[in-house]
Image (cartoon, grey):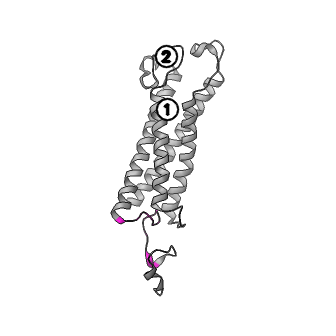
Amino acid sequence: MIHFVRIFVYFLLFIFSVILMALCAVRLHYTLHMSPLDPLNGGVRFYDHIVVELLVTSIITMFWSMFTARTIHGRHEHRRMNTFTAELVGLFVLFLLWLIGAAVATHTSNPPDVDVMWGNLSSCWAYSTCRILTTLLAFAWLGWLLVLALFVMSLLFAIANKAFHDPMHGRWDRRATNYGGDLSMRNIVR
């Protein structure tokens, strides 16, 4: 049952990553193709470094979630890449990327009003750029939350089953796999 939940959460993470990637692309397009009459930054074109970080994080997460969901669903077994340890290391890296991106974006501001942080844009929701930034922040924090949930689920499963070096699909039958493992089990006739 836990495997279906993990696949579903990875699917949600993929969807949220696609949405975040689109929002980052919209924000980058707006700031890099700004009209000289735009009041933001005096009409001078720029880009937010944290938006690029969130864009890269969402792209990496899309590939990671597809790879991992495919591995769990298809019961793929490769010596090092498909273990719970590899999944936990990958999720920890994604956890850091999502956390840094969401936290820095929450405390980012833009000229000319450097006192208005992206985390509190309720004063300008009449403008689409503010709504895009608010939605971008929401999906950044939701993505971080899903990565955290996946990390905790996989860690608890690996601890409970002593499965850190077992395949991440978690349905390992020593008699029906060529994965290796216990040497005493290799002499079993199939």
Assign a secondary structure to mark 2: loop
Nearest the viewer among 50 and 173 is 50
Q: Residue furthest front?
A: 183
User: How far across and how far down the image is residue 87, in percent?
Assistant: 48, 56
Instruction: Indicate whether residue 172 is drawn in magenta.
Output: yes
Q: What's under tag 1, amino acid-wise?
A: Leu
The residue that label 1 is drawn on is 136
What numbered label is drawn on residue 160?
A: none
Instruction: Determine the main secondary structure of the stretch shown in magenta.
Output: loop
Residue 88's quadrant in the figure? bottom left
The span from disc 1 to disc 2 (Cα, nearest Å) is 19 Å
SS category of the residue bearing label 1: helix
Residue 1, can we see it? no
State the image coordinates of residue 100 (x, y, percent, origin top left).
Answer: 47, 36
Q: Residue furthest bottom?
A: 189
Which region is colored magenta?
Answer: 161-175
Quadrant occupied by the N terminus: bottom left
* Among the two numbered marks 1 and 2 on one chain, the one whose residue lies closer to the N terminus: 2
Rendered position, 149 above or below 119: below
Tell me where residue 99 sits by quadrant. Answer: top left
